[in-house]
């Protein structure tokens, strides 16, 4: 085990590296979704290019709430109360409506944190895979009703009034949506009002609960801002105009636990495209609780105040006794032997043996050992001349057979197995045969 | 004096207890000080009851001479008004000595003097010294270890081992050749004419000298004896390979012991013995002289023979020797090699020498290598080592076989059996009249 320590360390490092890779390399499916036709990867750079500071969520970055102006929360889950299950077959995988599993309480936290624009899902998983938008790839409206109910807006109904491309002029340009998904404007809840309406229904509604002073905006059709929808018609310009209207004014009082001063806050407030599986936004700045102390010699003196002084005293006593014992030697200094010929011979044999072992041919090694043992025995029995070579070994077997035919037969069998080993033989079999060889040989040479 | 392990353990235990009390009952300092005070009192009491080191007077003596590979006994006498119940000894000594591992030795109760014998293995030839005696004994309550030490000035001269000669073992082995009470009368079946004597029944009829018998009108038989006054040259390689230790002694020491035994045996047999050694450079040849006269000189040369740190040069050494020998001789070469490649030069030069002389090459086998080829377990590591050792031995045997084919006599023996095997081979060579 002496030499195994570096290998264990290397093994641990490799294991740690692999674990790190798994941790860092997670979320491959999320990245594929964000980059797909129904993803929103292009949104943040595009908004930034249009003069609206925006950033996309990153699992390793926890932005402070004071830096965010609006959270864009595209949902890819139609049932927030149920964990996503692995699809049973390819068809189920194609029509899966949960592309990124979210927890209801987590979503509610995000909605009622900073001002949020929640984007309802529209397309099933097959759209990501095939990159084709088709009627069959729409999520059933009933599933979306479940989602709005879980969001606390059960009266909000989703409708799909057009069976094809809808092009409608709105403020900012021509809105273009394929198989548009809208809210039924006639059945909006009391707390909601349409923010962006079309003749067929409401595309964006804003809901406000006066008693709790909470507000949320909902976008019925994700094609307004996703990777492929953003490029249709004037959707981009319409979205920019919409977001400008939705971004709330900067708060006058940022609070003492918020980072940054009020003066610089508006310049840094960004739209947050939240595609993370969990809420990454930091609500409270713990670093503001830091208290600086003055360093003085009194701090050092506290190390020697009771009860620590007693512990140090014990330590010193033990150390002193140990040093006292170690300082006095009984007998002369031990000297290490310098390199001697016998040491070099031993080292040469050990090195040779090690090389033979790492060659990995244990069976051939044993075969040679058996041959050498038999040859030695034959030469010591009949002399160097008559006992050498295969003839000597054959003569030895004849000689042994006269003593004990049964044991010699067993020895012959074991020797034949060891000299022509099966390449697929296990090391345990090899060891067992070798043990048997020694036992039988000892019996034949010592008992008689 | 230093704290014992018991005291260290006690202090650590008390410290742990005190830390617990400091944390749990910081206001009660008396409770903490109490055990420490108790320990302090115990220490004082222990010191008062312990035999003081300054009262002990040691006397050490060792024999002036000893043979390499043997044990010499160091007798240490401790004298004091009262002695500790047990003591352990250690020595500061030169590298050529190996004292037995020290263990605590019980000393007689209420005695004022005690003798302790320490066996010391003599490993290297030459003057070896013992410079300091270390003593360790526990205090009365075993809280301390008392460690006095005294300077010593003891010297032992380690000589080559001639104990087989002194004990008569060599002479006993030579008896078949001597065949009589008189040492110089080497009667036997040799080829050299010795005397005529009356033929009696039972003698070999072929020994009858018919001419002489006709002249004296009586059957007279020729009696022959083994030839005498042959030259025996003992040639030792002193290169670094001969520094390998087999057991307690180096190969060079084993070779010296065997060479001295052979020199004595040759003297008994009436041959002239010379001595030559070579390392990186050849040493002067001690010319062949009648055995017993040569023995003293060879012995003194061997006593001062030092092992060369450099690799030996057999070409130079054996060429010089070959040039100095004017008469056919038995050259006994004690040398070693690592593998067949390094043995190449040795083989070539021995082959050259063999053209004019009888060459007996003496190699020392390593019992540890033999043991490696027969492992006790069947673990793959041991099997691999056995094969590696077997390959080295096979290579060594191949060199010896090659020497045999060249007509060079070889003797490969274990260190303990070398002298006896060498003399047997010498008797065999004489009997076969190979010289």
Image (tube, grey):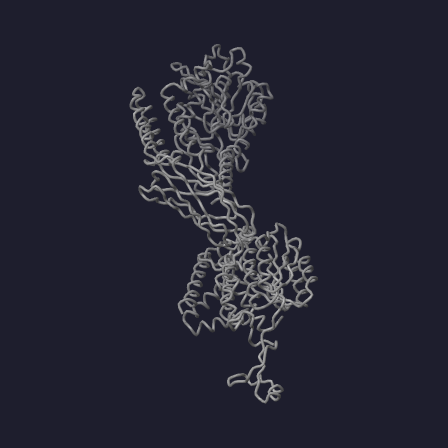
Q: Residue at x 31, y 43 (%)?
A: B109
Q: Is residue B41 left or right of residue A75?
A: left
Q: How many dots with numbers?
A: 0
Q: Residue at x 52, y 44 (%)?
A: A336
Q: Is residue A359 visible?
A: no
Where does the image place residue B321, in percent across and percent down from the top left?
Answer: 67, 60
Where does the image place residue B119, in percent across and percent down from the top left?
Answer: 44, 50
Q: Is residue B346 left or right of residue B250?
A: right
Q: Is residue B371 visible?
A: yes
> Seen from this angle, which residue lies furthest right?
B323
Asked where in the image residue A414 lies, by quadrant, the reply is bottom left
Q: Nearer the viewer, residue B333 or B71?
A: B71
Q: Nearer the viewer, residue A33 or B172?
A: B172
Q: Nearer the viewer, residue B360 or A337?
A: B360
Where does the image place residue B154, in percent across and percent down from the top left?
Answer: 49, 45
- Whether B302 is drawn above or below B190: the answer is above
- Whether B54 is drawn above or below A213: the answer is below
Q: Nearer the viewer, residue B8 or A419?
A: B8
Where does the image place residue A66, in percent across and percent down from the top left?
Answer: 49, 17
Quarter of the figure that contains the C terminus of chain A: bottom left
């Amino acid at each position: 085990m002496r030499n195994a320590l570096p290998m264990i360390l290397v093994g641990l490092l490799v294991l740690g590296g692999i674990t790190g890779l798994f941790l860092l390399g997670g979320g491959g499916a999320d990245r594929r979704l964000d980059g797909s036709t129904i993803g929103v990867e292009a949104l943040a750079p595009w908004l930034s290019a249009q003069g609206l500071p925006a950033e996309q969520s990153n699992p390793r970055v926890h932005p402070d709430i004071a830096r965010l102006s609006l959270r864009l929360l595209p949902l890819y889950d139609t049932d927030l109360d149920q964990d996503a299950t692995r699809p049973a077959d390819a068809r189920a995988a194609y029509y899966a409506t949960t592309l990124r599993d979210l927890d209801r309480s987590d979503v509610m936290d995000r909605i009622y944190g900073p001002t949020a624009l929640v984007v309802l899902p529209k397309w099933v998983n097959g759209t990501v895979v095939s990159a084709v938008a088709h009627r069959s790839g729409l999520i059933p409206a009933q599933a979306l009703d479940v989602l709005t109910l879980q969001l606390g807006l059960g009266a909000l109904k989703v409708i799909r009034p057009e069976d094809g491309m809808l092009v409608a002029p709105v403020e900012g340009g021509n809105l273009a949506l394929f198989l548009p998904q809208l809210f039924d404007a006639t059945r909006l809840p009391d707390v909601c009002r349409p923010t962006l309406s079309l003749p067929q229904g409401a595309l964006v509604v804003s809901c406000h609960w006066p008693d709790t002073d909470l507000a949320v905006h909902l976008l019925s059709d994700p094609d307004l801002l996703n990777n492929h929808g953003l490029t249709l018609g004037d959707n981009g310009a319409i979205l920019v105009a919409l977001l400008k209207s939705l971004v709330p004014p900067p708060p006058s009082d940022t609070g003492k636990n918020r980072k940054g001063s009020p003066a610089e806050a508006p310049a840094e407030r960004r739209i947050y495209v939240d595609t993370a599986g969990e809420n990454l936004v930091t609500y409270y700045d713990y670093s503001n609780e830091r208290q600086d102390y003055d360093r003085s010699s009194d701090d050092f003196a506290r190390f020697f105040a009771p009860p620590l002084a007693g512990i140090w005293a014990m330590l010193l006593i033990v150390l002193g006794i140990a040093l006292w014992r170690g300082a006095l030697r009984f007998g002369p200094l031990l000297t290490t032997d310098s390199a001697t010929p016998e040491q070099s011979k031993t080292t040469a044999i050990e090195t040779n043996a090690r090389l033979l072992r790492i060659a990995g041919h244990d069976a051939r090694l044993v075969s040679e050992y058996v041959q050498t043992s038999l040859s030695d025995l034959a030469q010591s029995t009949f002399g160097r001349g008559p006992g050498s070579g295969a003839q000597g070994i054959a003569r030895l077997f004849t000689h042994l057979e006269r003593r004990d035919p049964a044991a010699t037969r067993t020895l012959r069998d074991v020797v034949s197995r060891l000299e022509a080993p099966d390449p697929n033989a296990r090391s345990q079999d090899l060891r067992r045969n070798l043990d048997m060889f020694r036992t039988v040989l000892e019996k034949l040479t010592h008992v008689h | 004096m230093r704290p014992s392990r018991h005291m260290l353990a006690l202090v650590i235990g008390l410290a742990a207890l005190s830390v617990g009390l400091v944390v749990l009952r910081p206001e009660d300092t008396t409770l903490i000080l109490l055990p420490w005070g108790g320990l302090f009192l115990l220490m004082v009491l222990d010191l008062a009851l312990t035999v003081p080191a300054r009262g002990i007077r040691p006397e050490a003596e060792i024999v002036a001479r000893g043979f390499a590979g043997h044990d010499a006994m160091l007798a240490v006498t401790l004298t004091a008004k009262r002695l500790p119940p047990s003591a352990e000894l250690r020595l500061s000594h030169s590298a050529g000595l190996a004292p037995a591992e020290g263990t605590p030795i019980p000393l007689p109760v209420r005695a004022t003097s005690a003798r302790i014998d320490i066996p010391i293995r003599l490993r290297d030839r030459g003057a070896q010294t013992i410079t300091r005696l270390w003593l360790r004994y526990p205090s009365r309550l075993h809280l301390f270890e008392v460690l006095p030490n005294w300077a010593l000035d003891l010297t032992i001269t380690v000589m080559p081992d001639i104990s087989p000669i002194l004990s008569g073992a060599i002479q006993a082995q030579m008896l078949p050749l001597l065949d009589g009470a008189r040492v110089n009368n080497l009667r036997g079946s040799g080829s050299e004419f010795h005397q005529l004597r009356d033929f009696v029944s039972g003698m070999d009829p072929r020994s009858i000298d018919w001419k002489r018998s006709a002249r004296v009108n009586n059957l007279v038989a020729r009696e022959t004896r083994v030839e005498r006054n042959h030259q025996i040259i003992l040639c030792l390689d002193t290169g670094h390979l001969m520094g390998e230790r087999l057991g307690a002694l180096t190969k060079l020491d084993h070779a010296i012991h065997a060479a001295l035994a052979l020199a004595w045996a040759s003297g008994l047999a009436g041959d002239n013995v010379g001595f030559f050694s070579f390392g990186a450079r050849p040493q002067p040849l001690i010319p062949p002289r009648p055995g017993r006269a040569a023995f003293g000189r060879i012995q003194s040369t061997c006593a001062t023979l030092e092992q060369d740190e450099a690799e030996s040069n057999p070409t130079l050494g054996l060429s010089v020797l070959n040039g100095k020998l004017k008469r056919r001789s038995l050259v006994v070469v004690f040398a070693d090699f690592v593998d067949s490649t390094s043995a190449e030069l040795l083989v070539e030069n021995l082959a050259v020498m063999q053209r004019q002389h009888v060459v007996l090459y003496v190699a020392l086998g390593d019992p540890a290598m033999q043991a490696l080829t027969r492992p006790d377990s069947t673990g793959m590591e041991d099997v691999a080592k056995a094969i590696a050792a077997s390959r080295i031995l096979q290579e060594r045997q191949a060199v010896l076989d090659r020497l045999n084919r060249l007509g060079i006599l070889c003797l490969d023996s274990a260190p303990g059996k070398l002298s006896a095997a060498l003399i047997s081979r010498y008797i065999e060579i004489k009997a076969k009249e190979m010289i």
